[in-house]
Structure formats: C-alpha cells, structure tokens
Image (spheres, rainbow, N blue to C red):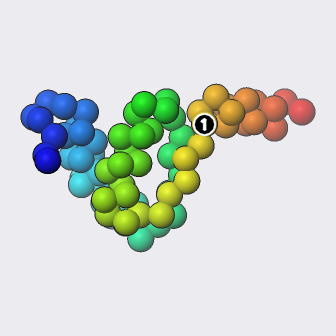
Amino acid sequence: MWPAPGSPGTFIGEELRAARSFWQDQQLVIIGDETVARLYRTALETHKIPLTMADADAMTLAGLNAAFN
C-alpha cells in the first residue's frame, strides 16, 4: 500500500529519494523522536539498508556529558 498524498510517509519517501546518494550502501543511525524515527526505519528497511536506532534524549545527554566533563 502506498502512503496517501500529503502523509508523512510521502514526505519521508521523497526526502529519502532525493538524498539517496548520501545513504545508499551506508550503515545508518537514526536519532530522533521515536514516532518519526520509526517512519524512517520502515522506509529504509524496505531498501534493505542496515541501520541502528538511537534514543535522541540519551544521545543528547551523552553529548552534553562528553562536552562538559
């Protein structure tokens, strides 16, 4: 089933299509809000792209901790 025009799936699909040369044949990490990150994961998994999901809050805290300690 294709996403409805104007849906988040349509926008993510167009974004990934336009940036394909940047992510194709790469190991990816998705960092972001869980709901949005799941949409990207679903889209990228259809292309068999290896990826890792990371929690945005945990990554932000780890980065701040590394920067200030």
Relative height, residue 47 to residue 61 (above, below): below
Residue with the most extreme bottom position: 25
Relative height, residue 67 to residue 48 (above, below): above
Instruction: Tell me the residue at 54%/40% (across/down).
Output: 31
Relative height, residue 65 to residue 24 (above, below): above
Q: Give coordinates of residue 51: x percent, y percent.
A: 50, 57
Q: Give coordinates of residue 55: x percent, y percent.
A: 60, 36
In front of the other: 16 or 36: 36
Instruction: Tell me the residue at 24%/53% (across/down).
Output: 18
Looking at the rendered structure, the number of numbered marks drawn on it comes to: 1
Residue 67 at least partly seen: no
Residue 57 at least partly seen: yes
Instruction: Tell me the residue at 49%/30% (across/down).
Output: 33
Circle 1 — which element?
strand
User: Is 34 left or right of 41, judged from the image as shown?
Assistant: right
User: Is 21 left or right of 51, judged from the image as shown?
Assistant: left
Residue with the most extreme left position: 5
Q: Give coordinates of residue 15: x percent, y percent.
A: 27, 45
Instruction: Tell me the residue at 41%/63% (across/down).
Output: 49
Quadrant the C terminus occupies: top right
User: Is 22 left or right of 33, judged from the image as shown?
Assistant: left
In the picture, residue 59 is in which quadrant? Answer: top right
Residue with the most extreme front position: 1
Which amino acid type is shown beneath numbered disc 1?
Asp
Relative height, residue 48 to residue 10 (above, below): below
In the picture, residue 56 is in which quadrant? Answer: top right
Q: Which residue is mark 1?
A: 55
Q: Residues within 10 Å of mark 1 (few under 14, many from 20)?
A: few
